[in-house]
Image: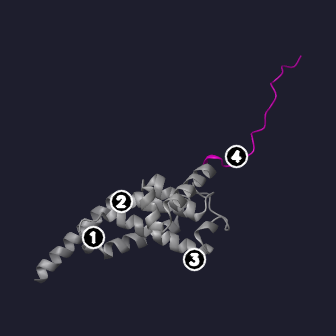
């Protein structure tokens, strides 16, 4: 009996290790986009990933045909939303605090969450809305606003224009 349980535990650990080997990089990238941290300096994203993987491992035996990647992504998104809510007093106030210079730093926490789910992860509007507890139309509007913000970011100052070189006479 104990040998069988030990064998099942080893199999479970191997299956989870294979899942992590295949999914951790993409999940870390999604977490880094959510936290708007730089890819090479992302402690909040790594913490989110660790918590999502720990939660996924804890319910590994109960997945029963469910996609473990989907479960980890859901936990990552809800954990980020919960932390943003507590940190900023709501998901929409993400610009109140100076943000690191990550790719999506110009967006609020809610906008980043929806952009990452919809565009990076390819989650349907209806699924994103259900996950976040928002109407589908609201998810669409937030996604559109975030895309507009990203496509119309203010540019830095133009480089100085130097006149043509004139040969001395």
Q: Is residue 29 in view from this perspective?
A: no
Q: Cα distance, mark 1 to mark 3?
A: 29 Å
Q: Residue furthest top?
A: 169
Q: Cα distance, mark 4 to mark 3?
A: 32 Å
Q: Cα distance, mark 1 to mark 4?
A: 47 Å
**Quadrant containing the N terminus in the rendered view:** bottom left
Dot in front, 4 or 3: 3
Res 25 → quadrant: bottom left
> Where does the image place residue 66, in percent across and percent down from the top left?
28, 65
Dot in front, 1 or 2: 1
Q: Are marks 4 and 3 in contact (CB under 8 Å)?
A: no
If you read the primary sequence from the N terminus, does the residue marked by circle 1 or circle 4 appear first? Answer: 1
Residue located beneath label 1 in the image:
63
How packed mark 3 is, by other alpha carbons closer than 10 Å (few <14, some 14-19, many 20 or more), is few
Is the magenta region chiefly helix, strand or loop?
A: loop
Q: Cα distance, mark 3 to mark 2?
A: 28 Å
Q: Could you say which disc has been placed on residue 5 in the image?
A: none
Along the line of sight, which residue is nearer the eye, 66 or 104? 66
Residue numbers of the magenta segment: 151-169
Residue located beneath label 4 in the image:
155
Dot in front, 1 or 4: 1
Residue depicted at x 75% and y 39%: 159
Residue depicted at x 75% and y 40%: 158
Residue located beneath label 3 in the image:
86
How packed mark 1 is, by other alpha carbons closer than 10 Å (few <14, some 14-19, many 20 or more), is few
Q: Cα distance, mark 2 to mark 4?
A: 35 Å
> Where does the image place residue 94, in percent across and percent down from the top left?
62, 66
Q: Could you say which disc has been placed on residue 23 in the image?
A: 2
If you read the primary sequence from the N terminus, does the residue marked by circle 3 or circle 2 appear first? Answer: 2
If you read the primary sequence from the N terminus, does the residue marked by circle 4 or circle 3 appear first? Answer: 3
Along the line of sight, which residue is nearer the eye, 157 or 154? 154
Q: Cα distance, mark 1 to mark 2?
A: 16 Å
């Amino acid at each position: 009996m104990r040998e069988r349980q030990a064998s099942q535990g080893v199999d479970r650990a191997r299956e989870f290790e294979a899942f992590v080997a295949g999914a951790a990089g993409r999940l870390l990238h999604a977490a880094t986009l959510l936290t708007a941290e730089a890819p090479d300096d992302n402690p909040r994203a790594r913490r989110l990933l660790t918590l999502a993987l720990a939660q996924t491992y804890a319910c590994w035996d109960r997945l029963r045909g469910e996609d473990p990647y989907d479960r980890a992504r859901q936990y990552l998104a809800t954990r980020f939303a919960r932390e943003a809510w507590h940190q900023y007093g709501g998901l929409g106030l993400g610009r109140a605090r100076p943000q690191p210079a990550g790719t999506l730093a110009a967006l609020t926490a809610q906008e980043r969450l929806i952009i990452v789910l919809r565009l990076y992860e390819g989650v349907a509007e209806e699924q994103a809305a259900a996950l976040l507890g928002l109407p589908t139309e609201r998810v669409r509007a937030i996604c559109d606003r975030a895309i507009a913000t990203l496509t119309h970011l203010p540019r830095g100052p133009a480089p100085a224009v130097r006149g043509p070189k004139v040969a001395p006479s």
